[in-house]
Amino acid sequence: MRLSLSFAALLTATALSSMAFAQTDPGFDPARLSEHIRILSDDSYEGRGIATPAEAKTVKYLSEQYAAAGFQPGGDLQPDGSRLWTQGVTLNRFAVTNLEAGLKVGDWTLPLAQGEQIVASTRLPNPSGHVMLTNAPLVFVGYGITAPERNWNDFKGMDLKGKILVVLINDADFEDASLDTFNGKAMTYYGRWTYKYEEAARQGAAGVLIVHEDAPASYGWATVRNSWTQPQFDIERADPSAARVPMEAWIQRDIAVQLFQHAGLDFEALKRQARSRDFQPVELPGAAFSGMFDLDQTSIQSHNVVARLEGTTHPDETLLYTAHWDHIGIGQPDANGDAIFNGAVDNASGTAGLLELARVYAAAPRTQRSIVMLSFTAEESGLLGSEYYAANPLYPLATTVGGFNMDSANVYGRTTAMSVIGAGQSDFDERITAAAAAQGRVIEPDANTQAGYYFRSDHFPLAKQGVPMAYAESGGDFRDEPIAARIAARDEYTDRRYHQADDEWSAEWDYGGQIEDLSVYYSIGRALADSRDWPQWKPASEFGPARAKSADQRE
């Protein structure tokens, strides 16, 4: 499906805008970007689902394109000293079927249908292949956070073993930024759904019901339904129960309101109480959850695609460029009967950027440090490809200089600014500011910090291990007419196409903005790869201590 808006004037604007950045563009080709996106998001790639025939097709395409660009295989090391194009990523796959679930308070019962009132799954291996929770008591634990450094504990020592936690999404400051307990409006990692489930496992809970609300989640129920009714994945863990609970679920807000009402509680009043350090967990009187489902569990092998251009004088020092190749695959048909989630913007566009960066790097004089392009798998399953690489790096993290992550590129035209996601973390801020200024652009902080995008893309597992990673994208206003049409197209993607079957390629896209962004990534990366410089975390960053542990391994 093409964009519903007319972009007749856009093609002319693209040609004109390309002249404006010719001096700073090292040779990125909009036609190549478009063709890579078109191919990778074609219906024949079936939405690039992991561990499907589409994965092999995607890996083959990427490997061939990296080779054609002039890079070498950079993946798993073989006994003969050669390397593959891929890093094997062992994942556990969990597919839920035959879900029967419901809530009960006294004589009141409410059946919950998968994808409608609830989405439920698990990432905890279960030998029986069947999960059953019967009349499990419910406890409202506010935002479900334990943060000693902020003097915050939503659990207050309550024994939660065998209970179902009802949890709010985001963190307390979202509703009242003036509290400034969790960095104001900016989401912390405590606000992410991944954290909620991890903390519930540490508390010994039997399951979690995250209450979905559009604004604090930063996406609608359709995104939750489309993502969580698909098979879920996790990396293999030595002790899965330390990080996973038997049931991970979301419920719609109106279901939570009904539940609380029948338990004699006021959802909104308790939500306000949850913003305080003094909040006490609240058992829902007489309330219980029952749920059972069959669990098809398999261990699968997916793949990160890894391409490397060896440095001339410091080949053991590595600069990274990353983007995920996977998307949702084939899901439930939409109103038009389309069940293929093509993932053109998310993230065939970022993957195309990696391929173009590889081509430009290989065509230029060789850098002193090595350049590695990492096309990650399983981002849509919880950043698992990058989580696996961060835990099993092919090139030592201590001598990984840093890197740039690209997720959902700008295909709507040039902009006046770059938005730095996670601004204030590292001195990449200053490097990006200088590179963008050379293009006549300014830097703006992340305009949507409450959405927690810093914790939602593949740079994050590397950052947790101390590797400085930049995550920046086009920001500000569009620079070229027709501005209103560009804004409408971008907004339409957010409202109607993100994680939907309609995320499809368009011949009318304008790659001027993506090329300016790629030029920033390239100019900074090129300078670092030809220097003895090491990007630094800022003193207030929570990731600095992890990097400091390996300081003696860097010259």
Image: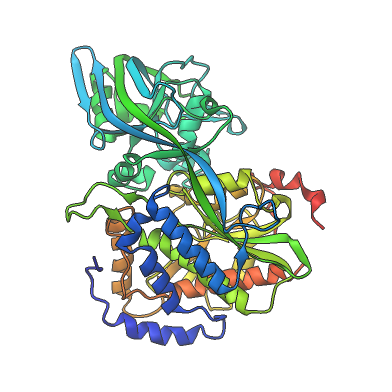
Q: Quadrant of the C terminus?
A: bottom right
**Residue 516 coordinates in the image, percent (x, y):** 50, 75
Residue farthest front in this picture: 80
* 226 lies above or below 523: above
Where residue 471 sits, quadrant-wise, is bottom right
Query: Viewer-proximal residue, 212 or 29?
Result: 29
Where residue 70 sits, quadrant-wise, is bottom right
Query: Viewer-proximal residue, 486 or 502?
Result: 502
**Residue 283 coordinates in the image, percent (x, y):** 37, 16
Residue at 55% across, 53% down: 422
State the scheme by which the image is colored.
rainbow
**Residue 192 coordinates in the image, percent (x, y):** 46, 40
Residue at 34% across, 80% down: 481
- Label total for image: 0
**Residue 153 coordinates in the image, percent (x, y):** 53, 26
Query: Viewer-proximal residue, 227 or 178?
Result: 227
Residue 277 in view of the camera = no
Residue at 37% across, 39% down: 231
Where residue 476 sits, quadrant-wise, is bottom left
Q: Quadrant of the N terminus?
A: bottom left
* 551 lies above or below 148: below
Residue 128 in view of the camera = yes
